[in-house]
Image: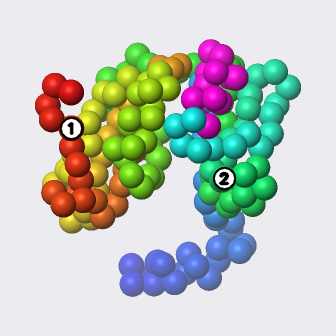
Amino acid sequence: MSSDNIGVDTARHADEDGIMTGVGYVRLPAHDVDKLAEFYKATFGMQQIGAFLDHAIILNVGKTIEEALANPAPRVIVDKRMKSNKDYGINDNNCWCFMTRGMEKILKRAEENGATIVMLPYPPPSLTHVVVGKFRDPSGNLIEMSEVGTDTPDRLYLRPQGN
């Protein structure tokens, strides 16, 4: 088979071979699942849509529980059985990345709710017009946020250095 036909062949056999259809959920370690669930509710406007016994709480984005249940976005599960990535540096690969809008507001809420800001938003050299910012949640998990289309000075409002 020539390299020109690789994509065509893969698409033709996808039903036979099986394919990944998307991300189902992100599982975050939590030493206190209730406390961490409250953090994500307060910071991102998430709702609790389920739980697993006493070790995990399932969250999703939505103004109401009904909206969160209907939202096809991947769920966030806080789980006390997992190990945190808190021992990794801010640029190591072990982190979760959430796509956002209004990153500065989210960072402010995250900090007010007990997070530690580890990287203020900045536009990396990119053709995709992406802004990146990072924080550690109250359980120490490194959370990266990416925002597309806000890397121009008139749309990105960085805090002065040292604040």
Q: Is residue 16 left or right of residue 120?
A: right
**Quadrant of res 147:** bottom left
Can you say whether 38 is above or below 123 in the image?
above
Q: Main secondary structure of the magenta part?
A: helix
Residue 95 appears in the picture as rendered: no
Does residue 6 appear to the left or right of 71 in the view shown? left
Left or right of 136, for residue 67: right
Give the labeled residue for mark 2: 63
Label 1: how many Cα within 10 Å (few below 14, some 14–19, many 20+): few
Residue receiving disc 1 = 159
Name which residue lies at 41% across and 27% down: 111
User: Mark 2: which amino acid?
Assistant: Lys
Q: Does 12 sit above or below residue 134?
A: below
Provide the residue span drawn in magenta: 30-41
* Element marked by disc 2: loop
Crowding near pointer 2: few (<14 within 10 Å), some, many (20+)?
few
Identify the residue at horizontal 61%, vertical 25% (top origin): 36
Type of amino acid at the residue the image marks with label 1: Arg
